């Protein structure tokens, strides 16, 4: 995550309507303010009417004419790097087959593994870069990217190298190792051996190559049990890597308590999260990440227990989960809309979910809100009210993005 790759410049935004989300979904809004970004960081926020501080350096001044400015959006859960697509599987599912049936018959994730193993680094970069370019048109400035379509050392390295190459090309990229995504064919019936291979052979090499920022695993009847995942997560923890879990997406595994000693920074999906797991979560600081677009795409009737998460004050983040099987979506704004319509999030909670709480789900505190000392990552919107960000479906009111002080302008007709 290098700042210099953005060619940082110093910029002063004037006449700003600052929209600053809090972890509980409330928004603090201030009109007519100025935001100064120096050397890539927010260095001054001046209230309307307050005295201008004299400066000895030139800055680019941009009058944003009262537009809403939010923190740059953070997509804290994606599987952005893969080859091929799963359109034919989509047609099968629309025709009545379930995601699990397709997976059990060797399709699903494993078909993307086949395509990704065959693709070159250059091809994977080209595909992921095009997706990332499109995602930035919806205000994204940071994205988390998972591996997990390689499931062997060579392809996991290839995917994570592509993630590092993407970092700094207009957005910041955080890389997650998802070796424990599904059991690869060559380890048929030998889950313990595969987990051992990941923990003892793959993960140490990836760390040596500085390719991993955090570690994720898929805890589900169709993938791995909590017991099977524990040695993998313990290995990650012993190497000081934060842990995240795909949890209770397709069924209730009743397993959060088994992970709680490892203090996962997030658990994600959560459609079937039970009361016991929520109570166990409430005793720690794990963030709940919900992914309404995947729920929609799989036509899931079961919804995450939003009301109970709220009751216990558990921070809720929201992500696209972009992937070819359950969520081929590139717009965080559409994810926000679906979070409101399908999961009953408030528009404020949806915005917190893609800013301050998304940063928490990634274990980072240098972005996700607008304050002095934070990264100069902002999204400027052609909207009068931040509720509009969750309201539109399919169009982006983005006016400009600022990434570490570098300004990217968007022509409304091209977004
Ligand atoms: O987050 N649930 C597991 N992993 C992905 C789906 C990956 C795929 O189907 O390719 C998810 O939904
Ligand atoms: Fe996922």
Image (spheres, rainbow, N blue to C red):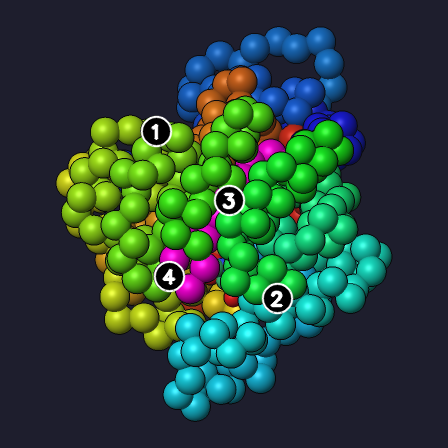
Q: In the rendered image of this protein, does residue 2 appear above or below residue 355?
A: above
Nearest the camera: 168 or 48? 168
Residue 144 placement: quadrant: top right
Q: What secondary structure is marked by label 4?
A: loop
Q: Position of residue 36 (x, y in %)?
A: 58, 23
Q: Which residue is mark 1?
A: 261
Q: Nearer the viewer, mark 3 or mark 2?
A: 2
* 113 magenta-colored: no
The CA distance from mark 1 to mark 4 is: 22 Å
* Marks 2,1: beta carbons within 8 A: no
The CA distance from mark 3 to mark 1 is: 16 Å
Q: Earlier in the sequence, mark 1 or mark 4?
A: 4
The CA distance from mark 4 to mark 3 is: 16 Å
Nearest the camera: 366 or 225? 225
Look at 74% across and 19% down and name the residue there. 58
Q: Nearer the viewer, mark 3 or mark 1?
A: 1
Q: What secondary structure is marked by label 2?
A: helix
Q: Earlier in the sequence, mark 2 or mark 1?
A: 2
Look at 55% across and 75% down and name the residue there. 106
Q: Position of residue 348 (x, y in %)?
A: 31, 45
Kindly tell me whether mark 3's CB lies below 8 Å from ligand 2: yes
Residue 221's label in the rendered image is 4
Magenta-drawn segment: 210-223
Q: In the rendered image of this protein, does residue 368 appear above or below residue 184?
A: above
Q: Position of residue 146 (x, y in %)?
A: 59, 49
Q: Which residue is mark 2?
A: 185
Q: Which residue is mark 3?
A: 216
Kindly tell me whether mark 1's CB lies below 8 Å from ligand 2: no
The CA distance from mark 2 to mark 1 is: 31 Å
Q: Earlier in the sequence, mark 3 or mark 1?
A: 3
Q: Classify mark 1: residues with Cα within 10 Å, few (<14), some (14-19) or many (20+).
A: few
């Amino acid at each position: 995550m290098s700042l210099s790759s953005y060619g940082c410049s110093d910029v002063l935004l004037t006449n700003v309507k600052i929209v600053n989300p809090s972890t509980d979904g409330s928004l603090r809004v201030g009109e007519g303010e100025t935001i100064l970004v120096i050397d890539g960081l927010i260095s001054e926020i001046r209230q309307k009417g307050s005295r201008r501080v004299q400066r000895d350096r030139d800055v680019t001044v941009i009058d944003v004419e009262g537009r809403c400015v939010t923190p740059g959006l953070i997509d804290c859960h994606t599987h952005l790097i893969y080859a091929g697509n799963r359109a034919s599987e989509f047609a099968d599912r629309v025709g009545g087959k379930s995601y699990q049936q397709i997976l059990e018959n060797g399709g699903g994730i494993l078909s993307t593994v086949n395509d990704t193993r065959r693709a070159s680094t250059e091809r994977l970069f080209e595909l992921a870069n095009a997706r990332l370019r499109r995602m930035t048109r919806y205000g994204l400035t940071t994205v988390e990217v998972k591996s997990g379509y390689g499931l062997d050392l060579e392809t996991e390295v290839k995917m994570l190298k592509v993630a590092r190459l993407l970092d700094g090309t207009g957005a910041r990229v955080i890389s997650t190792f998802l070796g424990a995504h599904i059991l690869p064919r060559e380890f048929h019936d030998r889950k313990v051996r595969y987990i051992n291979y990941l923990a003892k052979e793959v993960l140490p090499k990836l760390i040596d190559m500085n390719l991993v920022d955090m570690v994720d695993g898929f805890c589900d009847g169709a993938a791995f049990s909590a017991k099977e995942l524990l040695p993998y997560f313990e290995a990650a923890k012993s190497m000081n890597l934060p842990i995240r879990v795909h949890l209770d997406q397709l069924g209730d595994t009743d397993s959060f308590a088994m992970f709680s000693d490892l203090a996962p920074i997030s658990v994600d999906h959560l459609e079937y999260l039970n009361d016991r797991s929520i109570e166990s979560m409430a005793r720690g600081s794990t963030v709940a990440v919900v992914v309404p677009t995947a729920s929609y795409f799989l036509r899931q009737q079961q919804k995450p227990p939003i009301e109970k998460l709220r009751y216990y004050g558990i921070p809720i983040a929201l992500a696209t989960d972009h992937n070819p099987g359950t969520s081929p979506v590139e717009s965080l704004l559409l994810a926000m809309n679906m979070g409101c319509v399908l999961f009953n999030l408030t528009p404020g909670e949806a915005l917190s979910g893609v800013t301050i709480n998304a940063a928490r789900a990634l274990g980072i505190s240098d972005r996700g809100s607008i304050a002095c000392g934070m990264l100069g990552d902002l999204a400027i919107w052609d909207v009068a009210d931040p509720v509009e960000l969750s309201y539109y479906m399919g169009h982006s009111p983005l006016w400009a993005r600022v990434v570490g002080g570098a300004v990217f302008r968007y022509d409304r007709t091209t977004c």
